[in-house]
Image: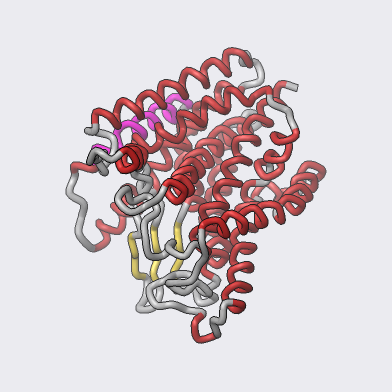
């Protein structure tokens, strides 16, 4: 019973972030300014557009952190060697899936001229690192996670290599944001997620998994989650007010409330700064504490998505792109417009798109269409023990 409740709370939070994540990707493909303007730019954005993008900031870090918690829980029935091997294989599979299934789902480019490395790649590589560090000790994972979380912004003060192999390594592990690594005259790797800052979230999640041990007091766990989440949230607020260490993009003020509010909340995701991770993980831990005993119609609804995150993640890109193709041709575009110079997506011209309210309608439709497939796969996975199911 205790285990079921713990899993339920994780599935609720994960389901919510998966649903919100689809909003961001729907906006990327269908909002008229998604390819031409920054929705978080304080000087030019609007309340609806800013918060449509900002709320999705919670998705990736929570997804990564919950992956760490889930890995710890699943490792309790394995030897240390078995758990390490499982992490390594799953991590390798996720990297391969990012390069193939996810990249094609995002671009629909059959030639793979651009390989996009995002959150699945970061989770996969972090799993591989976790498979190594967890063999040393639990404390090694905990302290590594804390050091990476608090200390990685020290690199903001270090001059990055300008070119060559050292620059590529620097971007892959520490500072990437849209860093293009050419692999041939017509193919590049686009690194959007630098590994180690995201590894911090996974290692922290793995360490939090200790509170989910079968013999651990549920009330003590909820208290610990509430305290830890509150401390991280307060740390974000204090650090942002101090406006020094913890984020390479300083808070700017000009006396306008909307501008100052947007600037306060606009922390750096690429790579995730200390402030960004405190801003997103802090409130999420509070919710994880509050929702542990929740069992309502809405929680059961969102849990359907939370139980099959990878299945949902892959499927939602293909469904979004299918909608994109339909609207692309129905808007009068032709075959000659499928590929746009400078854009990684097929069927997504630069100035294509709709108003934000239409984006919300499309998002709701897409999420609802994914409910039954997610429900079916969740039940199928619960009834069967095929080895390959743990990779989906």
In front of the other: 95 or 360: 360
What range of the chain is rendered magenta?
138-155
In the rendered view of the protein, which quadrant contains the N terminus? top right
In front of the other: 75 or 329: 329
Q: How many marks overall?
A: 0
Is residue 215 magenta-colored?
no
- Left or right: where 389 falls relative to 175: right
**Which x, y percent locates residue 98?**
52, 58
Q: Is residue 38 visible?
A: yes
Residue at the location (45% across, 51% down)? 49
Residue at the location (23% across, 43% down)? 156
- Left or right: where 369 falls relative to 211: right
**Which x, y percent locates residue 281?**
46, 33
Above or below — where is 20 with respect to 279? below
**Which x, y percent locates residue 44?**
33, 54
Above or below — where is 226 with respect to 80? above
- Left or right: where 77 falls relative to 91: right
Colouring chosen for the image of the structure = secondary structure
Residue at the location (62% across, 56% down)? 361
Predominant secondary structure, magenta span: helix
């Amino acid at each position: 019973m205790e285990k079921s409740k713990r899993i339920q709370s994780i599935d609720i939070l994960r389901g919510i972030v998966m649903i919100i994540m689809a909003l961001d990707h729907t906006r990327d493909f269908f909002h008229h300014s998604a390819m031409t303007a920054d929705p978080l730019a304080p000087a030019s954005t609007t309340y609806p557009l800013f918060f449509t993008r900002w709320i999705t900031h919670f998705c990736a870090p929570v997804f990564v952190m919950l992956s760490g918690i889930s890995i710890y829980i699943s490792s309790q029935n394995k030897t240390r060697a078995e758990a390490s091997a499982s992490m390594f294989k799953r991590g390798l599979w996720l990297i391969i899936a990012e390069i193939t299934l996810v990249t094609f789902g995002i671009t629909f480019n059959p030639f793979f001229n651009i390989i996009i490395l995002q959150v699945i790649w970061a989770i996969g590589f972090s799993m591989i690192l976790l498979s190594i560090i967890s063999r040393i000790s639990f404390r090694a994972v905990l302290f590594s996670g804390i050091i990476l979380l608090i200390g990685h912004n020290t690199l903001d003060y270090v001059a990055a290599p300008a070119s060559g192999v050292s620059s590529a390594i620097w971007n892959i592990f520490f500072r990437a944001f849209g860093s293009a690594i050419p692999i041939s005259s017509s193919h590049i790797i686009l690194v959007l997620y630098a590994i180690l800052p995201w590894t911090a979230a996974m290692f922290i999640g793995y360490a939090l998994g200790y509170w989910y041990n079968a013999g651990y007091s549920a009330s003590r766990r909820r208290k610990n989650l509430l305290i830890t989440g509150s401390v991280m949230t307060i740390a974000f607020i204090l650090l942002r007010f101090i406006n020094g260490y913890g984020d390479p993009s300083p808070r700017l003020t000009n006396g306008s409330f909307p501008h100052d509010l947007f600037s306060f909340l606009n922390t750096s995701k690429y790579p995730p700064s200390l402030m960004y991770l405190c801003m997103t993980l802090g409130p999420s831990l509070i919710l994880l504490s509050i929702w542990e005993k929740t069992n309502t119609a809405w929680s059961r609804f969102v849990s359907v998505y939370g139980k099959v995150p990878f299945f949902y993640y892959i499927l939602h890109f293909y469904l979004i792109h299918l909608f994109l193709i339909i609207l692309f041709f129905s808007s009068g575009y032709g075959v000659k417009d499928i590929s746009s110079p400078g854009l990684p997506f097929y069927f997504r011209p630069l100035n294509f798109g709709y108003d934000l309210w239409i984006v919300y309608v499309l998002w709701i439709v897409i999420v609802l269409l994914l409910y039954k497939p997610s429900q079916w796969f969740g039940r199928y996975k619960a009834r069967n023990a095929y080895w390959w199911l743990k990779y989906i």
